[in-house]
Image: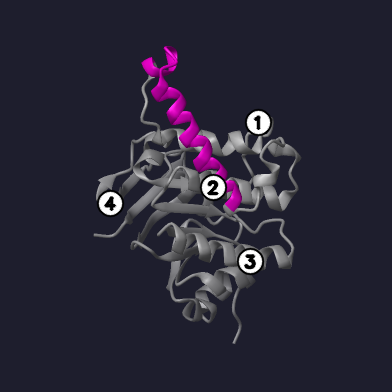
Amino acid sequence: MSLLEMDRVTCAFGGLKAVSEVSLRLEAGELVGLIGPNGAGKTTVFNLLTGVYPPTEGRILFEGRPVSGQSPWRINHMGIARTFQNIRLFGDMTVLDNVKIACHNQVRYGVLSSILRLPSHFRGERQIEEQALKFLSLFRLEEKKEELAKNLPYGEQRRLEIARALASRPKLLLLDEPAAGMNPQETQDLMHLIGFIRKEFSLTILLIEHDMSLVMGICERIYVLDHGTVIAHGRPEEIRSNPKVIEAYLGEVTS
């Protein structure tokens, strides 16, 4: 059984099909790329996987369980976390609190314990803070823990968003253009970071990215979308030379 399966999924808004009969599979532990020109439907796929949009047709299974119809928070509890193309941190909260929020889906104390301020509440809060600090240390952000998230430089905001996603302890991490706005050195650092967290947390990763050097450098398989449909799927070397992919990016191929 695949970790994730999209089976002929369509998402339509009125008469417009943002994605049409998209099928893809992810096996546990894979690092897979999802690429395509602007407007190809890549982020729509992520929104379908995380419950932002319901599919019009088709089915989505995660560990054999249906994702369709589930709310985003329930899908996160199932083990799917994501980052966004446009960073969506809680800007007026501290760096530490941004990560602590994601840790709260693992709390073991109940509402009554919090209301009555029982020892289990304080013990749980200490554990959450310890976990959050470990993630900040991993992403070299521990010294910034008391700063407001909106005051971090762009590259550090990207790292914080990934740290927050990981703090929910996902099995599948969806990264939506993590290298957007980064310089070449930051992109190289990001490649190493993605490889590291994949091994460290035994993650499966689905990656949307326009930086082809990053995609070709770290992805084992790649799906290519164009106008909402999958036009190619294979290893990086196969995708690089696929005429349909070249045409989608560069226009009509001439002989």
Question: Could you tell me which residue is drawn at 40 percent across and 32 percent down?
Answer: 107
The three-letter code of the residue at mark 3 reads: Asp
Neighbour tally class for label 4: few under 14, some 14-19, many 20 plus, Cα within 10 Å:
some
Q: Residue at x 66, y 48 (%)?
A: 141
The label shown at residue 211 is 3
Q: Is residue 69 left or right of residue 229?
A: left
- Secondary structure at badge 2 equals helix
Q: Which mark is residue 63?
A: 4
In the depicted structure, whether residue 229 falls above or below residue 247: above
Colour scheme of the picture: one colour
Residue 78 place in picture, x, y as percent: 34, 42
Name the element at disc 4: loop
Question: Which is more foreground, mark 3 or mark 1?
Answer: 1
- Which numbered disc, 4 or 1, marks the residue that appears first in the sequence? 4
Where residue 231 sits: x, y (%)? 45, 67
98 shown above or below 253: above
The type of residue carrying mark 2 is: Lys
Which comes sooner in the sequence, label 2 or label 4?
4
Find residue 93 and name its label. Answer: 1
Frontmost residue, 157 versus 17: 157
Q: Position of residue 123 (x, y in %)?
A: 44, 29
